[in-house]
């Protein structure tokens, strides 16, 4: 097999392994649907590629995924460069999400942290703050789930140690969530 074929096979196998996460994915869908039906919002954050995934997921909720429907309230905490850089400069990068969650998260919201390692300190801090404020916390993780696995209400751990494969699986997970949450609002 060529390198290209090996990468495609590895990616496909990782995505197929998500069948082992169907219970957690369904709990996430149920939690998000309940949150939105209760007039609450979704907040999402992560670093690097996970920051991009945060923005992508939020765009699907605010706009549409497959069908025309009302806009669903969601915020990505990775899009405001002035906030991120001022918090990093004035305090520490470790608090860029927790500080935002301190003022934006309300009881009943759903907060999703994305970390391929499961050990990103700023994601940990954001999820801890959100939990204290009464939000349901969900995490998209990789490797063994890291520290975050035991801190959240719903951990979804991708069975891989390859960052690109984990990120590909995370995209599949949030596309499933967006499609099935949207279906409940049609």
Image (cartoon, rainbow, N blue to C red):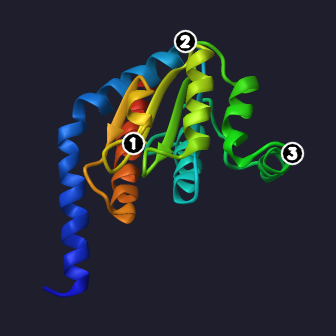
Q: Residue at x 55, y 36 (%)?
A: 124
Residue 11 is left or right of residue 167, and the answer is: left
Task: Give 123 or 7, whichever is nearer the viewer.
Answer: 123
The residue carrying mark 2 is 38
Q: Residue 52's image quarter?
A: bottom right
The residue carrying mark 1 is 146
What is the distance, in whole Å, between disc 1 and disc 2 at their CAs?
31 Å
Q: Which mark is residue 90?
A: 3
Element assignment for label 1:
loop
Residue 95 is left or right of residue 115, and the answer is: right
Task: Indicate which disc, 2 or 3, sits on the residue closer to the N terminus.
Answer: 2
Q: Which residue is drawn at 23% across and 45% down?
A: 18
Element assignment for label 2:
loop
Residue 91 x %, y %: 81, 42
Nearer mark to the viewer, of 2 and 3: 3
Residue 19 is left or right of residue 109, and the answer is: left
Q: Residue 133's image quarter?
A: top right
Task: Indicate which disc, 1 or 2, sits on the residue closer to the N terminus.
Answer: 2
């Amino acid at each position: 097999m060529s390198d290209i074929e090996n990468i495609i096979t590895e990616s496909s196998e990782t995505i197929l392994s998500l069948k082992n996460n169907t219970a957690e994915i369904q709990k996430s869908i149920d939690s998000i649907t309940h949150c939105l039906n209760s007039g609450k919002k979704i907040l999402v954050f992560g670093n690097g590629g996970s920051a991009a995934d945060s923005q992508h997921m939020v765009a699907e909720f605010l706009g549409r995924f497959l069908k025309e429907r009302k806009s669903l309230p969601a915020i990505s905490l990775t899009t405001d460069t002035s906030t991120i850089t001022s918090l990093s400069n004035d305090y520490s990068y470790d608090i860029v999400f927790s500080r935002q969650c301190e003022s934006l998260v309300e009881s009943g919201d759903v907060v999703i942290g994305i970390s391929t390692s499961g050990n990103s300190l700023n994601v940990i801090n954001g999820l801890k703050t959100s939990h204290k404020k009464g939000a349901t916390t969900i995490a998209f993780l990789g490797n063994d789930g890291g520290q975050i696995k035991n801190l959240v209400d719903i951990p979804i751990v991708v069975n891989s140690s390859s960052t690109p494969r984990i990120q590909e699986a995370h995209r599949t997970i949030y596309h499933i969530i967006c499609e099935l949450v949207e279906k409940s609002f049609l």
